[in-house]
Image: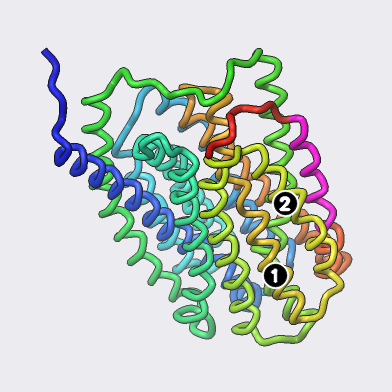
Amino acid sequence: MTTTASPSAKAAQSGAVLQILFSVAFVHLLNDCVQAALPAIYPLLKQEFALSFAQVGLITLTFQCTASLLQPWIGLYTDKHPIPFLLPMGMCMTLLGVALLSSAGSFGMLLLGAGMIGVGSSTFHPEASRVARLASGGRFGFAQSLFQVGGNLGSALGPLLAAAILVGRGHGKFAWCAVLVVLAVLVLVGVSRWYGSHLKNAPKKTAAHAGPPLPRKRVLQALAVLAMLVFSKYIYMASLSSYYTFFLIEKFHVPVGTAQMYLFLFLASVAVGTFAGGPIGDRIGRKRVIWVSILGAAPFTLALPYANLFWTGVLSVTIGLVMSSAFSAIVVFAQELVPGKVGMIAGIFFGLMFGISGIGAAAMGQIADVAGIEQVYRIASFLPLLGILAALLPKMEKTRT
């Protein structure tokens, strides 16, 4: 005998699922706000610890590598053996990283604290992305965008947090970030309970494949293209997120507070672009979004190194809006290429994002030490031209009307 849920019961269930989706997006905001506060205080750390640009890049590399290397393996394991309470457990590692950074007395301690925050991030992103997909109601692009925009908003708020409570007061005030991390742990406990209940009630549900079946060779080729697009996007984005304040201070001689406001505007534009990218991809097709968002940013990135202060702000906001719409579409596209491996794919692409950003930040630090910070932006400006590779992606879905 089968039973059909009443409309009121379905509405209540839908509301509860939407609440879970907003919860993971909110925690993504808190998580990335704490992470973004770190590069926002790089000028402070550089002064306090007498760091070179290369050492600043190594801090980013340490965080990004620990955040990237574990993610695919965690995603692969939890695809087969889900661990709902891994979410709050991972956030506790972030809490440890905040404690180490705020009490650091040496460059080594800074690296260790950054590494612990990276470990926390590596456990959060694959499982949280899976929960977002489970709570999507079939609107995978929208769910991934909402989840991702939480992180982008957090990244935008991080510099403001740094400006409000950290700059001018010493790196020890970074301990205030622990308040955000504790709040994230509490929210994730509730999310984990829902996740565990969902697994018990629907253990045999499998992921739907939105596109036609493809040969293994074609799938691997498409994944390689997506990886190259992530490479071009996040090497460039690393140049803005890690060194934008230095660029503005050196080229235009603006104070730190003004430079951080420009960084906030750029990161806020990234959040807006990310939120738009998923629903647009659901409607017109993710391949088109990927194509336009990366290759379409090239004219603006090529102009940025030669603009005055006003147009630098305008161009950076435009770049943020256009370029950021790609990532949600890339993740969902990849998940549709490899159905049933949601966690592994999320781990690979979030990990790839962090790893590439870290390596790029370290390499650019070396370039900045040798050739100057402006040369970083001249070199990086050509990377979005790799967006032409999107032409090699298979057509995975029909346009929605």
Q: Residue at x 24, y 47 (%)?
A: 15
Relative to 125, residue 162 above or below: below
Residue 182 image point, x, y percent: 30, 59
Q: Residue at x 63, y 76 (%)?
A: 262
Residue 131 image point, x, y percent: 37, 38
Q: Residue at x 46, y 31 (%)?
A: 343
Decide whether residue 384 is among the magenta residues: yes
Q: Residue at x 77, y 34 (%)?
A: 391
Q: Is 285 positioned to the left or the right of 2 in the image?
A: right
Q: Quick check: can you spot residue 351?
A: no
**Residue numbers of the magenta segment:** 380-392
Residue 232 image point, x, y percent: 74, 47
Amino acid on which disc 2 is placed: Ile
Relative to 199, residue 169 above or below: below
Residue 244 disc label: 1
Among the 4 quarters of the image, the one containing residue 273: bottom right
Q: Which residue is mark 2?
A: 235
| Cα distance between the residues tagged 1 and 2 | 13 Å
Classed neighbour count for the residue bearing mark 1: other residues with Cα under 10 Å, few (<14), some (14–19), many (≥20): many
